[in-house]
Image (cartoon, rainbow, N blue to C red):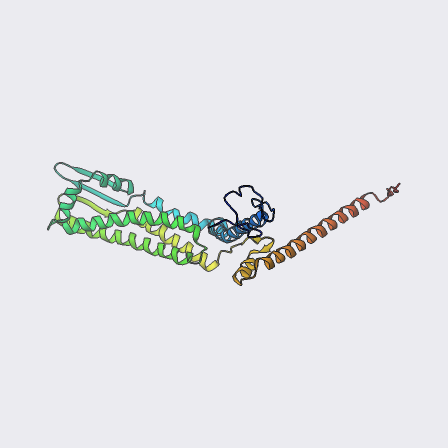
Amino acid sequence: MAATCPKCGGKLKLTDWRPNCPHCGVNMVYYGMEERLLLDADKAEAEHARTQPKIDRIKAATVGSPLAIVRLVLSLVPIAGLFLPLAKFAFQAPYAAFSGNVNVITLYNAISATDLDALTGMFSSKLFGTAFILYAVAVVCVFVSAVGVLLHTIFQTLACSPKGKQRNFAFDVINLMLVAAAIVCFTMFSSRIGALLPSVIQTSTVGIGAFIYLALLAVSFGADILCVVKGIPVKYKECFVGNIPADKYFQLVEEGVPLEQIRQVMAEHTAEKEAAKAAEEAAKAAAEAAEKAEADPEKEPVAAE
């Protein structure tokens, strides 16, 4: 397909390598550049206008008010409960013994050192299988809830988004259910394993840390509820596209208003803005002159030569 001049539409030959059109003489390289730059500027401002509300909501959800800051902190605080004694366990076997408290670090080290083949064999055992499955479920629930707490904190940045409330409540409820399930499963495990090995298992109880962890999750849930009840205001920054308010610009584009008319509206808004700025500067200069005259009333103005 032959190339054509962007202004007159004349066909160009392969020998027409110069920047000027052989038909109308216009510089084809720079022709329409101003309009293209304006279009690029409009596109950039429109994209900023679409992004700015999201930034405003993130700011409101994290540091928009003291209540938002408290909620953000309380959503992460439950992690501290995992480092408290989640369980107290003591056993005495011929070749192994343990006595002490168990927290998330102890659990992680124990899982890292566990032989998976032997663990799978314990799950399939008719005697101990149910007990160890309950123990495994309790451990999995603890670690999944820890991941849930971290995700909850991360997604607090989107708490003021349209689905932020539902998302926060979902994290709260799921994390509470996971920790409650972990406590119940470990209690059932302790009962079963204690009955099966009464001479080996000396102590197997849920620690105070598990209940503190559960309580901290409940407090975080309460903070989310309080933020919904009280409400966190979002201060939206006004954005413009070519000196037109962004909402009006998007409305004009959606209505299919020709670009020439949009440019005319932009020019009108620009003129109004410049007139308002000039009036403001004139009023400011007049006020400064009045203050100066009031401060030195005896000084007479110098006559013009």
Question: Where is the C terminus found, in terms of image quarters?
Answer: top right
Left or right relative to 184: residue 80: right
Residue found at x 36% / y 50%: 216
Q: Which of the two residues, 188 or 248, is positioned nearer the viewer here?
A: 248
Residue 47 location (% of width, % of height): 51, 51
Q: Position of residue 259 (x, y in %)?
A: 57, 57
Query: Which quadrant holds residue 172?
Result: bottom left
Out of 72 and 13, give the one closest to the viewer.
13
Q: Nearer the viewer, residue 216 or 303?
A: 303
Which residue is rendered at x = 21% and y = 46% of the image? 204
Count numbered badges in the picture. Answer: 0
Report whether 80 appears left or right of 120.
right
Residue 167: tell me if it is visible. yes
Q: Residue furthest left?
A: 126
In the rendered image, which quarter is residue 121 located in?
Answer: top left
The answer to whether residue 65 of the structure is visible from this angle is no
Expressed as whole percent of the image width and height from the top left, the position of residue 279 reads 72, 52
**Residue farthest along the bottom direction in this orientation:** 255
Picture residue at 16% right of the left edge, 52% below the top: 130
Q: Position of residue 199 (x, y in %)?
A: 12, 44
